[in-house]
Image: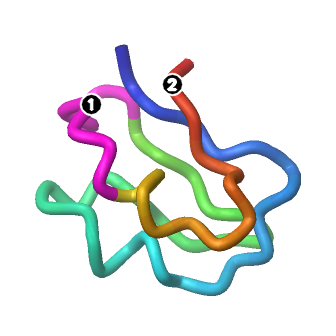
Amino acid sequence: MAYVIDDSCIACGTCIDECPVEAISEGDIYVIDPEVCTDCGSCAEVCPTESIHPE
């Protein structure tokens, strides 16, 4: 099950550097590609707004 980023994302970029498979793309809020996400949770651990959670 992939992780998702909800509307509370502030697009700070912290999660992008933590993703080992480059599944996160930038935008108004960031988006995780469910086809690439390996469900490791590294991004969720560093998110300052707790916007990332399992789908």
Label 1 secondary element: loop
What residue is at 21 percent from the left and 39 percent from the top?
A: 40
Dot 1 and dot 2 residues touching (CB under 8 Å): yes
Residue 36 visible to the viewer: no
How many C-alpha atoms fall within 10 Å of the one at disc 1: few (<14), some, or many (≥20)?
some
Q: Amino acid at mark 1?
A: Asp
Considering depth in this image, is 8 or 46 the residue closer to the camera?
46
Foreground pick, 40 / 23: 40
| Image-quadrant location for residue 39 | top left
Q: Residue 53: image x %, image y %?
A: 57, 35
**Image height check: is 18 above or below 38?**
below
Residue furthest to the right: 7
Q: Earlier in the sequence, mark 1 or mark 2?
A: 1
In the displayed structure image, the side of residue 2 where residue 18 appears, left or right? left
Query: Which residue is at the far left?
Result: 20
> What is the x, y in percent for residue 19?
25, 62
CA–CA distance between discs 1 and 2? 8 Å
Is 44 magenta? The answer is: no
- The residue pinned by badge 2 equals 54
SS for callout 2: strand
Q: Main secondary structure of the magenta part?
A: loop
The region drawn magenta spans: 34-42
The kind of residue tagged 2 is Pro
Q: Which residue is mark 1?
A: 39
